[in-house]
Image (spheres, rainbow, N blue to C red):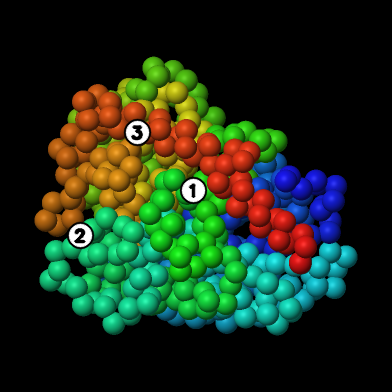
Amino acid sequence: MEISEQNVKGEAHILCYSFAIQGHLNPILQFCKRLASKGLKVTLVSTISASSKLIKTQSCSSIDVELLDVELRDTPNNSKEGERDESQHYFEHYKTIVAPSLAAFIENQMSSNYPPKFLVYDSIIPWALDITKRFGIDGAPFFTQSWSCNTIYYQFYREKSKVNAFEDQAMVLVPSLPPLKINELPSFLNGSGTYPSIIDLCLNQFSNIEEVNWLFFSSFDKLEEGAITWMATQLPVKAIGPTIPSKYLDNRLKNDKDYGLNLFKPNTETCLKWLDSKQPASVIYVSFGSLAALEKNQMEEIAWGLKNSNIFFLWVVRESECEKLPENFSEETSEKGLVVSWCCQLEVLAHESVGCFMTHCGWNSTLEAISVGVPIVAMPQWADQPTNAKFIEDVWGVGMRARGNGEGIVKREEIEVCVREVMEGERGKEIKRNSKKWKDLAKEAVDEGGSTDKNIQEFVAKVLYM
């Protein structure tokens, strides 16, 4: 039964804490909006480093946004093979600085007119649960990667001794998942022992999992049915995705047309005006997200692969990456391409002119493409992205993976072949049909009475009667 906003608003207050990077803020923010639409009072809490400017838009006006008054080093860049892993110091520093600040914020909220009843916290900070207990409130983690990827982490958490013990194995078997090659696992589990602190961070998401009554994650039941069904026999998991603005799914949340918080300023008007001048499904959109830092030679291969395909392209190249482009590339390809520093990705993906998405396969980008039915050319870089690419190509059938050579570089010829096949080839026709199917199932999940809608409604009812 739908809970009336009149009965709940102002009486049931929850906090949601997100790590301050775009790939974590976006899904947790959308979960906040869904909870607020059910009548809860919701406050999103995060930290923003001094070098980042948070851009807030009207679409997140249904929730409160609070930034903790802390000073943090910038999030470390993605290290390359053979470089020192600096993450351990950063996350130790993060906990030392943020934990007392978060505790102080909650303590202050407890004396307000509407003290919080619950904290939904980013799963990479499991220590947040200890803070909630201090104040007698409940808490639950929010996982920002695919549930299949989390199933892998959970299995390795339970069998830690096996993390670096399968270098010679052809395949790795994880309950409920298809057999995975070593290079299809999350990159931190590839047996090399690289980034040990990040491995610990990923596995320790489950360190106190037996103490929680809810595990939230951005996916939907039919998309990852095997993993969700199996994990539900182990843990209290709840799929509450896709966590993207309602405009692109069920359209039940008023004015919810973008995420509402940006760490980069988008070139929206420029992109949409350019796309408006192109024919339907004639453009490949290219973006590698907010964090990925590609090698210069890889950027050059992408550039010439796009040029040689002779297909219109819109390429997001962050300002920090622009120097890696071939000299005068933008000018030489101006008749076929547009290079911008950032864009509103969902608006671009949903534009009728876009026929394909070349992506690093971050989970948010993957879900966005699935939700709006855009075929994918997968070029995973690290973390969960190789696993997502495996499912994109072999399980959901919504794209092709562009494969690297012996040095891990995806050559221009491979890029051209994949782009042409997805946009114009016979395999591309099947990919387009599959993309349409998953788009419909994503909408069904979040629509009234869908699996995601029911899971969110169940949680709201629980919070209301705490």
Q: What amino acid is at disc 2?
A: Lys
Q: Which mark is residue 220?
A: 1
> How far is mark 1 from mark 3, CA to CA?
16 Å
Look at the picture and state if 273 lies above or below 159. above
> How far is mark 2 from mark 3, CA to CA?
24 Å
N-terminal label among 2 and 1: 2
Q: What amino acid is at disc 1?
A: Phe
Percent x, y for residue 71? 61, 72
Q: Are marks 1 and 3 in contact (CB under 8 Å)?
A: no
Q: Which secondary structure lies at badge 3?
A: helix
- Closer to the camera: disc 2 or disc 1? 1
Q: Is residue 160 left or right of residue 179?
A: right
The reply to whether residue 261 is in sight is no
Name the residue nearer the viewer: 283 or 429.
429
Q: Are marks 2 and 3 in contact (CB under 8 Å)?
A: no
Name the residue nearer the viewer: 457 or 137.
457
Q: Which residue is mark 2?
A: 181
Q: What amino acid is at disc 3?
A: Asn
Residue at x 21% of width, y 25% of height:
426
Q: Is residue 55 left or right of residue 178?
A: right
N-terminal label among 1 and 3: 1
Percent x, y for residue 291? 42, 56
Q: Which mark is residue 434?
A: 3
Q: Which secondary structure lies at badge 1?
A: loop
Q: Is residue 390 left or right of residue 74?
A: left
